[in-house]
Amino acid sequence: MPTVADQFIEVLVEAGVERIYGIVGDSLNPIVDAVRRTPGIEWVYVRHEEAGAFAAAAEAEITGRLAVCAGSSGPGNLHLINGLFDAHRSGAPVLALASQIPSEQIGTAFFQETHPERMFNECSHLCEVLSHPEQMPRLLRSALQTAVGRRGVSVLVMPGDIAERTTVNPTGRGNVHSDPPTVVPPESQVRALAESLNSAERVMLFCGAGTRQAHDEVMRLADTLKSPVGHALRGKEWIQYDNPFDVGMSGLLGYGACHEAMHKADLVVLLGTDFPYDNFLPQANTVQVDIEPSHLGRRTALDFAVQGDVAETIRAVLPHLTTKTDRDFLDRMLREHADTLERVVEAYTSDVDKQVPIHPEYVADVLDDVAAEDAVFTVDTGMCNVWSARYVTPNGSRRMIGSFIHGSMANALPHGIGAQLADRDRQVVAMAGDGGLAMLLGELLTLRTQNLPVKVVLFNNASLGMVKMEMLVDGKPDHGTDHEPVDFAALAGAMGLYAVRVQRPEEVRVGLHDALSHPGPAVVDVVTDSNALSLPPQITGAQVKGFALAVSRTVLSGGVGKMVRLARSNLRNIPGR
């Protein structure tokens, strides 16, 4: 007779799930055995359950489909929580199975006893206990639909002994509806938006991840309004390419004229962004368009809000707009953007290809050159966020995945695992910091075991660079951020991976090219300058003073790679030039 575990796996396969990330353990054994006996699904052995949750999140982000991870009772499923927070906040549809101690022991302070149904509530849309065979398959299908439909995490807690019991209900058939909804705002909101856009002289568009399917619509809106277009980090991959209105990015990692354009506009239009840094927003003269109602108005005061899909909203409002002819604001911001980028580039590019230690900006710039046109970049939190934001050139085919909302260390490598398993033929590049890689170093073994051709490009500066910058900006001498250098290439080689250590700038291009050409997993350990730090585009005088007091040999702002050429090319759109 089939068991609950068999039925559990049967429902997952029916829903299109191809793998479960986790570490085997006693309360999970019935599930793992059911995977062994079921065609079409595999168990992916990660070295830490946190990595399994990160991997599932990346797979879900790349495919748009449900991904699954699991943790055994007590410590096993507790290890999932950081990766699940990341998945949930990123809107990745993930199911987590948190197995539990024997059901008759719950509440007795038994070995490894915890209460996952309490602990996972904050990082899930649904967190329920599967405590009777009669709850299957209904509860599991509800969890799957919730994760996919609400774009986030569902958690099912199941004691190991329940998994071994005989099923009661037939599995039957069930579909998981995964197509996201299209929300068209009511006519009253469309007309109010049109009136506001028509009456404003200087409109600026600020775009987030909600513009994913709206690039062409945003470009048409910007052309109609003669508006500069800026973006948040999560909007970069969707909106910056083929964009003659681009003025860069705002926020802690920002660059260019985005901040200035936002604060000099008569009206700022937030499109599909829940940009969290309210101190970067003007807090006035703002309207917001978002499909998620809870995002509306929680970061800034709004003149009014529009609930709707960005593309559908723009398509609805365009017929009501009067095409503007005055390009003065747009052209001034385009010039300021190009000039700002060139000034920044000049601050660091002098003989950068000859300087030792290697400038991390140079590494990121070369990586952008040699990486595939459809590469997936997974990016560690910290300074790697800066280098990826400023140097990886989006083109509509590349993807960039990171812990951009949760801000966890150590995400790049496990995100790379999930992205690569989603498509073994696509190039995946994990831009890792040495602090993040050290935290989940064992996942290099997962690359070897699964023979995943992830390319780990390690920015090895023997420092926690972002924390160092935070201390220096605050006027505090950095302490506890630097550590003894580590030869990670040697460690990776000992694990059986192709690895190369790069210590001179003339070795960078060859080292990256050879690793990217290698058919299996590879690690490029690049020794970079620990003093190459980056400040936001807008900081206070007190922060500057603090930074000056704390350090005298630091690159204050990294460059922006090929974006300066893009900015200059956009000036050709200015009449009379």
Image (tube, rainbow, N blue to C red):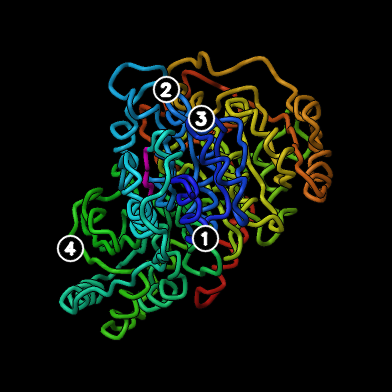
Magenta span covers which residues? Answer: 152-157
Query: Dot 3: within a 10 Å radius of its alpha carbon, few (fewer than 14), some, or many (20 or more) residues?
Result: some
Q: Amino acid at mark 3?
A: Met
In the picture of the structure, the residue carrying the numbered disc 1 is 16
Judging from the image, what secondary structure is the residue with disc 3 in?
A: helix
Report x, y in % for residue 413.
61, 39
Q: How far is disc 4 from disc 2 in space, using C-alphas? A: 39 Å
In the picture of the structure, the residue carrying the numbered disc 4 is 304
Q: Amino acid at mark 2?
A: Gly
Q: How far is disc 2 from disc 1 in space, using C-alphas? A: 54 Å
Q: How far is disc 3 from disc 2 in space, using C-alphas? A: 16 Å
Q: Main secondary structure of the magenta part?
A: strand
In the picture of the structure, the residue carrying the numbered disc 2 is 546
Q: Mark 4, mark 2: which one is toward the viewer?
A: 4
Residue at horizontal 45 percent and vertical 69 percent from the top? 213
Judging from the image, what secondary structure is the residue with disc 2 in?
A: helix
